Image (spheres, coloured by chain):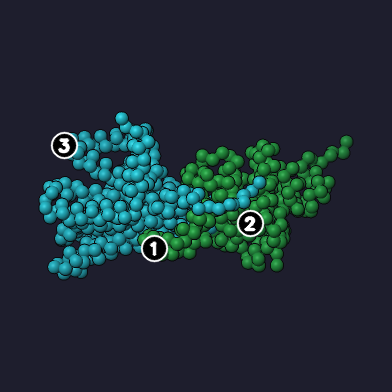
Amino acid sequence: MALLEIDHLTHRFGGLLALSDFNLSLDGNELVGIIGPNGAGKTTVFNLISGVYRPTKGSISVEGRELVGLAPNRIAALGIARTFQNIRLFKDLSVLDNVRCANYGQAGYGALLALFRLGRCRREEAVIIDRSMELLTLFQLDGHAEEPSRNLPYGLQRRLEIARALATRPKLLLLDEPAAGMNPAEITRLMGLIEWVRKAFNVTIVLIEHQMQLVMNLCERLVVLDFGVTIAEGKPHEIRSDSRVLAAYLGEEQPA
Amino acid sequence: MTDPLIGKSLMGQARSLANRQWFKGGLVAAAFLLSFVIPATGLLDQYVQLILMYIGINIILTVSLNLINGYMGEFSVGHAGFMAVGAYTASVISVRLFPVPWGPWLFPVAVAAGGLAAAVTGLLVAFPSFKTRGDYLAIVTLAFGMIVKSAIENIDALGGPRGFLGMERLTTLPWVFFWTALSILAIRNLVYSRFGRGILSIREDEIAAELSTVDTRRVKMIAFVVSSFFAGVAGALFAHLLQFINPRVFDIIKSTDILIMVYLGGIGSLGGSIIGAVVYTVLLELLRPLGVWRMVLMPLVLVLLMIYRPKGIMGLREFSWFVPGADLFASRRWHRKKGTVYGPP
């Protein structure tokens, strides 16, 4: 069974067709990129998968389980985590607390135990701290654990956002423009990080990106969107020479 | 000649002593004992004892409102409404239900019942908070406060606008201390649990919180229930201290008083809430000789505070005294025990 199965997904904002008849099937441990010009509907796909929007039509399922209609936190608990185009950390919280927040769904103790800090609450909290510190150490953020996350430099904020997403123990990780605002050296480092995350955490990754060097080198498969329509799908080298893709990005050659 | 290093280590030792569990527990126990000794021996006069009890009640109100307004970042202006529900419920129970000689023994039951009644009302207010945020939720809670007040005014069994009386003076210094300590402890425990981090993450970014598996609806419900429970407790204590309540006591002015204490002390801080409640209550008393002018001076203090310290005295900061050891030493403990971890390139 496919990990993620998206069928005939369509989404309208009022009269605007943001996404039309989008299909995608993902197996475990794949690394797929979604590219396309601005406003092509890429982030809409992520918002639909993670439950921020409810699709006008179509279905999304993870390991055979239908996601449409579930609350975002339930979808996240089923193993789908994401990052955002514009970083959305919990800025006033410490780096450690950012990661600990994402452990909400894995702890099972109720509010009454929490009010008195008893038994299961105490034990699970200790586990959460250890797990979170371990994750931060893996991401080389452990030295910043107690700083408010707003104090981190930009690159580390991106890193922390990925760490926070992984703290939910996802099967599928959605990265929305992870390289936005990065210089070439940082991008090279980010590519290494993404490759490593995929292996070390055994996740399937879908990423939206404008940075072609990263997309072409990293992704095994690409989906190209333009005005909400899938105009091409295939291996990076096929996409590179696809005439529709070139037209979407560069404009069509006008006959004289 | 003093050695700065020795001085520092002494300070450090004092601090680590103050953060020991047994030390904290001992200090609270000693203070509890003192709350019995003071009324028994007349160590402080009646007036000062009364102020101490007001301070305790105000601490409960401030800490519980801070959960919603500070930690969760909502803007509730109906806290006096929950207080009223608690005050009336507890009063009716202790006047109508309990035989007088049993009063002192059943008092905690009446207070808890007041809290529970307020908690149930809090649950109702939680529902609009699922969809409504910020200014809009403020209006919802404002309306809630008005509904409670006019409902009570129109129920004759509760005395309507004339008020309700007949309560024994059951609120004593030890009881105020007990409930104050319990509310601080419970809310601290909640704040440093997964629900507390849920509450904080809602303040920071609700969408990101949901996508990080936080069940925001459940978290909001818990926050409102706990907050209103303690507001109800404070109301119950207040009613059995004054021995007379009427709907006007719990109007928007009362809610505003609590808001002022929260923002004076600092949002998202237990230490701040306590400081805010103490400073505000004491200042109001000290300024009493000024008569009407204190109502000019107090707002002025607030305006100045908002200009020079917009986050309040302790905004978003906390005394380490209130932080559980597991949180306080999380990263230090980890660094002591961690082995080799293979990170990314």
Q: Measured from the top left, where is residue B96 in percent x and y?
A: 19, 67
Q: Chain of mark 2?
A: A
Query: Label 1, on which residue?
Result: A118
Disc 1 residue type (three-letter): Leu
Q: Which mark is residue B289?
A: 3
Q: Residues within 10 Å of mark 1 (few under 14, many from 20)?
A: few
From the viewer's perspective, is residue B100 above or below residue A146? Answer: below
Q: Secondary structure at mark 3?
A: helix
- Mark 1 secondary-structure assignment: loop
Q: Residue furthest front?
A: B1
**Amino acid residing under circle 3:** Pro
Neighbours of disc 2 within 10 Å: few (<14), some (14-19), many (20+): few
Q: Do circles 2 and 3 both sit on a common chain?
A: no
Give the image location of residue A6, x and y in percent. Answer: 69, 60
Q: Which chain is green?
A: A
- Chain in cyan, by letter, is B
Determine which quarter of the picture holds residue A67.
Answer: bottom right
Residue positioned most to the right:
A256
The percent coordinates of residue B25 (x first, y second) are 30, 55
Label 2 and label 3: CA atoms lie apart by: 68 Å
Mark 2 vs 3: CB contact within 8 A:
no
Q: Is residue A32 left or right of residue A66?
A: right
Q: Which mark is residue B342?
A: none
Tell me how far mark 1 sits from mark 2, CA to CA. Answer: 32 Å
Chain bearing mark 3: B
- Residue B310's x, y, as percent? 38, 37
Whether discs 1 and 3 lie on one chain: the answer is: no
